[in-house]
Image (cartoon, rainbow, N blue to C red):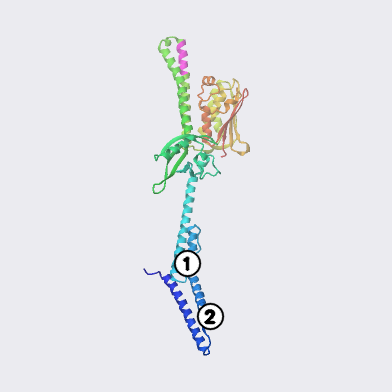
Amino acid sequence: MRAPRLLWRIHAVAILCAAGAVGVFLVYAWVVIAGAAPGAPVGARLLLGALGAVALAAVAALGAARALARPVEEAAEAAARIAAGDPAPRLSSGPTRELDALAEAVNALSRRVLEGQGDARRQRTHQDAVLASMTEGVLAVDSGGRVITLNPAAARLFQMEGHPYRGRTLAEVVRSPDLLRIVSRLEAGDAPAETDIALGTAAGRRHLRVVGTRLADRDGRRLGTLVVLSDVTRVRELENLRRDFVANVSHELKTPVTAIKGAADTLLHGAADDPDARDRFLAIIGRQSERLGALISDTLSLARIEQTVDHGAVSLAPGPLSPVLEAAVAACEPQAGARDVTVTVACPEGLSARIDRLMLEQAVINLLQNAVAYSPAGGRVEVGAAPAPGGGGVEIHVRDHGPGIAPEHLARIFERFYRVDPARSRELGGTGLGLAIVKHVALAHGGRVSVASTPGQGSTFRIHLPPA
């Protein structure tokens, strides 16, 4: 096998240095012998000349070797730095074609390593951005049960924000026995798992949908377990809310339907022949029919408002508030006149807000109907609108001077079918949905509702609307 050309060049340099030393020695010897007197000793001088020639050859060979070795050492140092992940400086051309090719190869390798590091950083940045932007929690553990990745959403769920988690065991990071059992089952098999768990957090009890699967590399080798956690608390709350709503509606419908059926059966079994009994039972049917109609109407109104808000179909436009209040008072005049209740209106001209006039009018009517119903005969109800304190929008208020509401009821007064006095509410024809409708109308306008009440002194309900 032929030696590489660089090795031949090194050998050639060594031979040339040796030949040069021999030549120098021969010239020196000739000069010494030629100039020496007959019989003079020349051995010592020849020995000294030989040593000088050898030294000269060694110095020349060392210089040549260092000139050839320096580019190789620089290339070796650059390769070591590249292997350690530290980008190496660009190597200059060597004194030979072979060393020049070596420098170019090392420079090319350095460029590729730098490009690979840049690609890896960009990929890592994109991966971190995706994980940070996810609303679902992502948790990855290795085959030894130690945490590999925990995205910000999962860190918030497990209250690990700002705390080191990488390399810690899952039991140190997660305080949920249910989740630990799920991960253990996933580690024992390859089948994906999907289930719901409850988790106590700083924000309260949360319901999570857990989807877990095996974590593998591109070659299919198992690395650990990957778990995705979705917060379904709001979904569960809505399911419970709808379930309660259906149960309450069924209960509320059952009462008037039962009363109507009982009165009709009594009339069919002979009470129709008695004028007094007939009038009494027909009056029951009439009242319960009105109550049933009001309940159905309020239920449909609430469903329509919720659907409008969910689909983003609320059409708000700047409009004056005075006509809305006056229309609501006009709609309640028959009820107020029947109870001898005076309704007054106070609204500055030109006061406006972004509103849906029909929805807002219905909310004010509901508040006025409640205020009139709970006001004593000859009482007074005040309705008005004014800029909110501090310039934070507009407030519509309805104030009565009735019995008021006890403090323990104020937090739930706007819930569906919640009644402070169920017996009196049904006696007055209330459906239990009027204030819930008011609340949803306010939410549809981007506002809120509030109530202030003192037992024995009356109540004030307010609709807070944001600035136009």
Q: Label 2 amino acid?
A: Leu
**Nearer to us in this view, 202 or 317:** 202
Mark 2 and mark 1 lie on one chain; the one further toward the N terminus is 2
Boundaries of the magenta span: 276-286
Magenta stretch holds residue 285: yes
In this view, the mark in front (2 or 1): 2
Q: Give the secondary structure at mark 1.
A: helix
Q: Position of residue 14 (x, y in %)?
A: 46, 74
Can residue 310 be seen by looking at this rendering? Answer: no
Q: Position of residue 254 (x, y in %)?
A: 45, 21
Q: Is residue 367 above or below residue 67?
A: above
Q: Is residue 224 above or below residue 433?
A: below
**Nearer to us in this view, 439 or 268:** 439
Q: CA distance from mark 2 to mark 1?
A: 36 Å
Name the residue beneath numbered marker 1. 72
Image quadrant where residue 190 sits = top left
Give the dominant element type of the magenta stretch: helix, strand or loop. Answer: helix
| Residue at the left extreme, as displayed | 1
| Residue at the front extreme, as displayed | 39
**Nearer to us in this view, 336 or 412:** 412
Can residue 422 be seen by looking at this rendering? Answer: yes
Name the residue beneath numbered marker 2. 48
Q: Label 1 amino acid?
A: Val
> Residue drawn 43% across and 40% down?
187
Screen quadrant of the C terminus? top right
Q: Give the secondary structure at mark 2.
A: helix
Q: Position of residue 291 (x, y in %)?
A: 48, 22
Give the number of the disc on residue 365.
Answer: none
Q: Position of residue 40 (x, y in %)?
A: 53, 88
